[in-house]
Image (cartoon, helix red, strand yellow):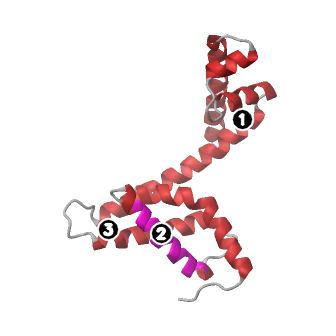
Amino acid sequence: MTTPTNPTRHEQFVALFVRHEAAVHSFIMTLVPSMADAEEVLQEASMTMWRRFDQYQSGTSFRNWAFQVAKYTAFNFVRKLARDRHRFSENVMMLLAEHAEREQSDREARRRTLEHCIAKLEEGERSLLSSCYAEGSTIKKYAEEEGRTPNAVSKQLNRVRRTLLLCVQQTLRLEASS
């Protein structure tokens, strides 16, 4: 149980962990019964990842490695709670973990595809999206700033959403067939 001492290795771990922490946390939440349990498992899993970071091979998927560590940490956590009859069996936990890993991977592919499709939009359409989805923004506020009616902005936003949906569906379908 040695900890990495190379500061570069430490920085690498922190950068990778921070980038994937939300996904790992979401994954853990599918495996344990409560948010408090998920927080506890995430804390334990992150310490285990740090202690075992020397086993991680650079260039491979940190997210997949972190999911494996988190999965076994969650299994151990649930096993400790096994006396409580309201907990999942290990087989159910394994099925949930496999499903959650596939879902997370699909979600990530859809997110990347959506970013690609947004980049293909015209500048005005991207501006509309970023303005309407900005924190604290509303369609009404945006319409007032642009001197348009909220109804006109809503219609344009719906057209952009439809364009994005078609682009994402088409791109994912093409990727699946190749």
Identify the residue position indicated by label 1 in the image: 118
Instruction: Tell me the residue that label 2 is attached to.
Output: 43
- Please determine whether, in this image, residue 68 is positioned above or below residue 140: below
Calculate the distance from the C-alpha at mark 1 to the C-alpha at mark 2: 35 Å
Is residue 41 inside the magenta stretch? Answer: yes
**Vertical relation: 78 (above or below) 50:** above
Quarter assignment of residue 32: bottom left
- Kindly indicate whether the residue at mark 1 contacts the one at mark 3 (C-beta within 8 angstroms): no
Q: Secondary structure at mark 1?
A: helix
Residue 78 tag number:
3
Marks 3, 2: nearer the viewer: 2
Give the left or right position of residue 144, taking residue 2 as reference.
right
Element type at marker 3? helix
Tell me which segment is drawn in magenta.
38-53
Q: Position of residue 34 (x, y in %)?
A: 35, 56
The answer to whether the residue labelled 1 contacts the one labelled 2, judged by CB atoms less than 8 Å apart, is no
User: Residue 122's spot in the image, x, y percent?
Assistant: 79, 27
Sequence-first disc among 3 and 2: 2
Q: Tell me whether the residue at label 3 lies in contact with that at label 2, contact meaning CB atoms closer than 8 angstroms.
A: no
At mark 2, the secondary structure is: helix
